[in-house]
Amino acid sequence: MNTKDMVMAALFAAVIAVLGLIPPIPISFIPVPITAQTLGIMLAGSFLGRKVGTLSVIVFLVLVALGTPLLSGGRGGLSVFMGPSVGYLISWPIAAFAIGYLTEKFWDNMKLWKLIIVNFVGGVLLINIIGAPVMAIMTDTSIWASITGAIVFLPGDSIKAVVAATIAVQLKAVSPIKKKTPVLTHNMQHSN
């Protein structure tokens, strides 16, 4: 990993933190609020790729664990990793990796609709598939109740998937993701 990658990881950790300044929207029937920070997770994966995107989210979560109040609503410290949102927090680097991996796979032929699907699968479905059951365990409620409660996140997260994909496609030219080059085969023979 070079200096540019480390700077980009730090920059996107800051982007996720800035999105935390947008106040959370509490939901009466589940203990996890709606936040804008999942947009940052999707952007990290779809703009930076799997390695740098994941690193940016890990840097952000380490800062939160150290007590920096970077989560939406000014939360931070180890206590947030003991609460009902821990599954969602744990899912963030996994989601950034999945989004980055799939983005890199489609990079040479990236279309907006493909990246929207990648962000939806990695940034909406994957985060909720991990977050909702862990929330059920932490709140001692049924997994089914947590999963059905998490449906409230789908409309907003779907919009975030579209926004993140649109931004990443528009900024593709400056993304640190490298264009894949075809591998040369060794079947070439020299003739004299």
Image (cartoon, grey):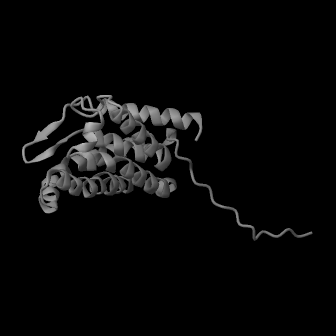
The image shows residue 42 at horizontal and vertical percentages of 35, 46
For the residue pair 31 and 5, the one nearer the viewer reads as: 31
Image quarter of residue 120: bottom left
Residue 85 relative to residue 15: left or right: left
Tell whether 5 sits left or right of 167: right
Q: Is residue 164 above or below residue 74?
A: below
Residue at point 12%, 54% (across, down): 149
Q: Residue at x 20, y 46 (%)?
A: 84
Residue 13 rendering spot, x and y as whole percentages: 40, 34
Quadrant where the image shows the C terminus: bottom right
Q: Is residue 122 left or right of residue 171?
A: left
Position of 111 compared to 124: left or right? right
Q: How many marks?
A: 0
Where does the image place residue 6, in percent across and percent down from the top left?
A: 52, 35
The quarter holding residue 185 reads bottom right
Q: Position of residue 129 (x, y in %)?
A: 26, 58
Vertical side of 125 occupied by 21: above or below: above
Q: Residue at x 37, y 41 (%)?
A: 167
Residue 43 visible in rendering = yes
The answer, for residue 166, to whether it is visible in the render is no
Quadrant in which the N terminus is drawn: top right
Viewer-proximal residue, 78 or 182? 78
Question: At 27% across and 45% down in the image, what residue appears?
Answer: 160
